[in-house]
Structure formats: C-alpha cells, structure tokens
Image (cartoon, helix red, strand yellow):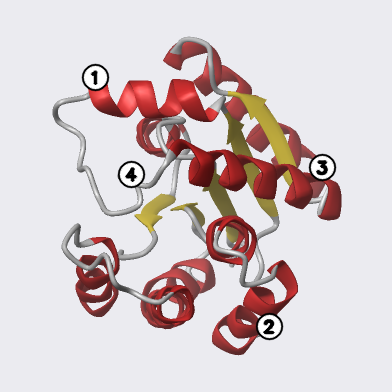
Amino acid sequence: MTRGIFITLEGPDGAGKTTIARMLAEKFENTLLTREPGGIEIAEQIRRVILAKENITMDPRTEALLYAAARRQHLVEKVQPALKQGKMVLCDRFVDSSLAYQGYARGLGVDEVFTINQFAIGDMMPELTIYFDLDPELGLSRISKNQGREVNRLDLESLDFHQKVHEGYQLLLERFPERIIKIDASGSPENVLQDAASAIEKHLNKEA
C-alpha cells in the first residue's frame, strides 16, 4: 500500500491559505482536505468554544490546551486513518499555528506550547509545511473586505497581536527550515496556487 503523506498549510489570518487548500485538494489525486481546529465533530465543538467572539475572557493557557485537545482528537480520528489508507492529507493549520499564536504572540513560550502539543500528537509531525507569508495589515484588510468569511475571536485581535503572529512564523521558518517552505501570498490566487503546487510536487519527486 502506498504510504500516506502529511502536509500542513500555515499562515497569518487573511493569507488565503484556505482558498488555496481547496484548489490543491482538487489538483492532487487521493487527497483528504481537513482543517484545525475542527475536521471532526468533537474538534468542531471545541473550535466553536475557542473562536466564539463572546469568549473574550479566555486565558491563553486555556486556549492553548483547547487547541491541543482538538488536535489530538482530529489526529486519531481522521488524519492517521487517512494516512494509513495511503492518502495525501492536506491540513489547514496544525502545530505551527499554536507555536506562532499561543507560544509567541500570546507570550506562553514556543517551547512550552510545543511540549503541550507533543503530549497531544506524539511524534506525528508533517513531512512538509507550506507557509503562506503575508503582511498582517494586508491580511486584516482582506478579512474586512471578504463578507462571506467567518469572522472569529482571533480576527478581532489588535494589529499588534497579528504582527507578533507574523514574527512568530518567521522564527519557525528559521527553526524548521528543512520542513517549512515559505510562499509569497500577496499575489493572485493563481500564482500562489502554482507556487504551492510546485512545492508539493518537488517534495513528492524527492520522496519517489
């Protein structure tokens, strides 16, 4: 049986990765597209708690733990079975989001949040992560113009918070250069899709 491939998509809010993820899933055969937090019912329930706009008093550690809990359930119930079936799994956000958002931007510590997530996922890290890089101001501008997009609690954070998220991702690029591929997300969807697809194809050819 063909070995499955686990690929994650990361980026600041408004980078367009969710749109590109759908396009990638259509482009590559035998692909499962899923998202975090969510993807399965229990994790979707946790997602609603995390992202509800009224939950403004949520403690950062609570937030980090809820993400890790949703991640664990999603992993064992959906991601791992698909990989065992030999599928390519494209996951819209994974551990790197927690490291950038809660670890760096919330100030909990990247290593500390990584430890929480290691308990949740064991050694289950993606083979390839595509990071869609975008200036935070442009990302927030895109969100405000997109009337059909879900606006959640994190979208309502200050520009300073989103700038810290961006900084957090830059640190992760330096920390995991062998895994994370940076793509300029400021261009047209067609160009961003081409760059993302090329990164995946290059990885597949390397593994062949």
Q: Earlier in the sequence, mark 2 or mark 1?
A: 2
Q: Amino acid at mark 3?
A: Lys
**Secondary element type, mark 4:** loop
Comparing marks 1 and 3, which lies closer to the viewer? 1
Residue at 44% x, 67% y is 82
- Residue 186 against residue 25 in the figure, above or below: above
Q: Amino acid at mark 1?
A: Lys
Residue holding disc 3: 206
Residue holding disc 1: 145
Is disc 2 in contact with disc 1, using a CB cutoff of under 8 Å?
no
- The disc at residue 115 is 2
Front-most of residues 1 and 73: 73
Q: Residue 51 sits in which quadrant?
A: bottom left
Is disc 3 in contact with disc 4, using a CB cutoff of under 8 Å?
no
Q: Amino acid at mark 4?
A: Asp
Q: Earlier in the sequence, mark 1 or mark 3?
A: 1
Q: Earlier in the sequence, mark 3 or mark 2?
A: 2
Residue at 26% x, 25% y is 144
Callout 1: 10 Å neighbours few (<14), some, many (20+)?
A: few
